[in-house]
Amino acid sequence: MQQQEFAKPMLREGALDGKVILITGGGTGLGKAMGKYFSELGAKVLIASRKSDVLEKTALEISAATKNEVFPVQCDVSDYKQVEELLKKSLDKFGRVDGLVNNAAGNFISPTERLSNKAFDAVINIVLKGTYNCTLAFGKHWIEKQQKATVLNIVTTYSWTGSAFVVPSAAAKAGVLAITRSLAVEWAKYGIRFNAIAPGLFPTKGAWDRLLPGDLKNNFDLKKKVPLNRVGEHQELSNLAAYLISDFSAFINGEVVTIDGGEWLNGAGQFNILQAIKNEQWDEIERMVRSVKGS
């Protein structure tokens, strides 16, 4: 079967030669896809997350495919001291970091009244606190060293629309969007650019199992909400990310690029359709979510 054009690499070979790029949440899913493509384009890539075994496996896998070094660093981005150590390890390894992709995320569906404050904290700490921890630590270093750099934040379309049943994520991502636009202006004088990507439906096993556990993936065909009637390919998002983290996008600053096939225009809030779920069904969903989390 012939590969679709949109699923092919976009930038020329060596487009990221000499760049050192850190991706949080880089061990799986979209973070892994971006890391692989950046490495293919010549970048030295660092990937960070809390799971060292997953990171090490991914780093070896990408390195074997691209022949470029990928450096895994265990780090809980919600802990500023660990982020400072991440910065130190990055500098010890490669001497510099040119780009930061704030991709680490956490999310699950639930009626808000069923959430505990700890559930809220779990998402806010990873998404919002993790983003500003990394941005602050690396940004202070860049400013002190008078080094130009690029930050790419991964947000979502409900950052500006909001969405039922994912309130912690919506609140956190809205904060990340505000950080992106605010620092794009404030830190431009230091040569530090900020942009964001708002992906639509790009299925990854981990995220999909948490959001729609069990047979729910079959009961809710979310691609029907997309005017293009399909979900995104990981390479499509990686192409966009590589462009925005590269010097080819040097005059793009403070922008949020939506890549969702027109979904949010077709109906704001990815999970508003879940209004159809009855209270008894939420009990079953909660049991399935807990079983997935425990696996």
Image (tube, rainbow, N blue to C red):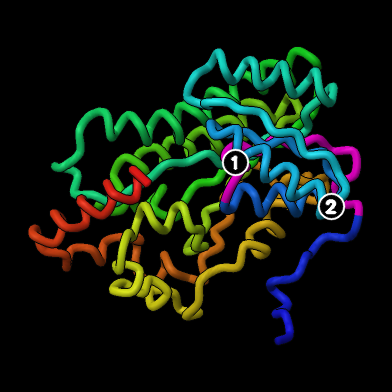
Compared to residue 209, the image places residue 192 above or below, namely above
Where's residue 132, x and y in %?
A: 52, 26
Q: Residue at x 75, y 31 (%)?
A: 149
Q: Is residue 186 magenta?
A: no
Which comes sooner in the sequence, label 1 or label 2? 1
The residue that label 2 is drawn on is: 66
- Is 52 left or right of 280, judged from the image as shown? right
- Closest to the observer, 59 or 266: 59
The residue that label 1 is drawn on is: 54
Q: Residue at x 35, y 68 (%)?
A: 217
Compared to residue 217, the image places residue 38 above or below, namely above
Amino acid tagged 1 = Val
- Is 147 left or right of 203, judged from the image as shown? right
Compared to residue 78, the image places residue 269 above or below, namely below
Residue 102 appears anywhere in the view: no
Name the outermost residue toward the left: 280
What range is drawn magenta here?
14-28
Name the secondary structure under disc 2. helix
Which quarter of the picture shows residue 46? Answer: top right
Residue 280: which disc?
Answer: none
